[in-house]
Amino acid sequence: MKMPHHVAIIMDGNGRWANKRGLPRIAGHKIGLESVRAVIKGCSEKKIEVLTLFAFSTENWERPKDEVGYLTGQLLVKALEEEMDELHKSGVQLRVIGEIWRLDNKLQQKIADAQKLTAGNLGLKLVIAISYSGRWDITEAVRKLCGEVAAGKIKADDITTEKIGEYISLHDLPEPDLLIRTGGEQRISNFMLWQFAYTELYFTDVLWPDFREKELVDALNVYVSRDRRFGKC
Ligand code: FPP
């Protein structure tokens, strides 16, 4: 069994990591960024093609205002400001998926700059899902397809599974082979619902700020030991 082409991660447990130490939740997100760095490095070294990180879900907008402000206004902006040069030098190509228009203008600008800067890079494709949800992704695809039907460009009968897939985020990349979720919960939480049809799921109790290269290797070893049949025998 080969290494995964595409690894997706639900980075859960930052708040609990901070609580355990009597720190504000924000401190957990801050250290979580170090795990992000470690995982990007690990995936680049292992020549994994795509790494998708769930940084902020549509549902996360419901969190307390100061936490939302910290995640979308400070942490992600700071991460892009501080990391992009290094990521660019190491050949990482950045893509962001989600409702970008909902983000504050400064973050939108940083995302646009970073995507432009790294568009031609041939190393790891790093996808950050921000204000993203799987149901939003599928809804967008349906909305666009209905527009094509209304404009007479395609017929309703032309809508096949493959056709819908063409309108889903990251349709031009291999689908995730492995989903890692940290923090002990065993659910998908409205992440890439369409793309996960045959993804191998790996759950670990390790909290995200403690998830580093060793924990990544553990997850990859479990993946390599799995027998993938894609519904066939
Ligand atoms: C979930 O932990 C984590 C988040 C909602 C934010 C994760 C974001 C980062 C680590 C920064 C990512 C940055 C880049 C550039 C990709 P939680 O708050 O739900 O923890 P809990 O379940 O313990 O409360």
Image (tube, helix red, strand yellow):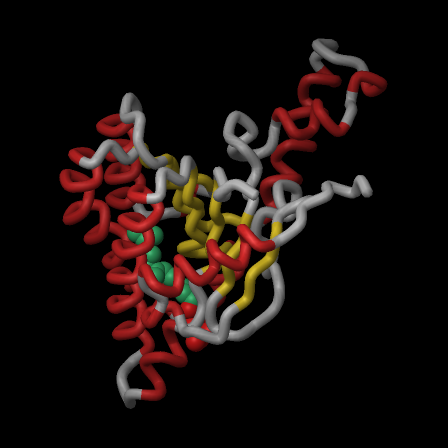
Residue displayed at 20% across by 36% down:
90
Return the residue found at the far right.
Answer: 157
Q: Is residue 232 left or right of residue 78?
A: right
Q: Is residue 217 above or below residue 101?
A: below
Nearer to me, 7 or 149: 7
Ligand 1 is found in the corner quadrant, namely bottom left
Residue displayed at 29% across by 89% down:
22
In the rendered image, is residue 115 in sight?
Answer: yes
Q: Quadrant of the C terminus?
A: top right
Residue displayed at 62% across by 47% down:
199
Q: Is residue 134 above or below residue 185?
A: above
In the rendered image, is residue 72 in sight?
Answer: no
Nearer to me, 46 or 170: 46
Mark count: 0
Nearer to me, 153 or 214: 214
Residue 111 falls in which quadrant of the image?
Answer: top left
Residue 155 falls in which quadrant of the image?
Answer: top right
Residue 201 falls in which quadrant of the image?
Answer: bottom right
Nearer to me, 122 or 165: 122
Q: Quadrant of the N terminus?
A: top right
Residue 129 at x, y percent in the picture: 44, 47
Residue 231 at x, y percent in the picture: 79, 43
Q: Is residue 95 left or right of residue 109?
A: right
Residue displayed at 56% across by 61% down:
202
Residue 63 at x, y percent in the picture: 45, 69
Residue 91 at x, y percent in the picture: 24, 32
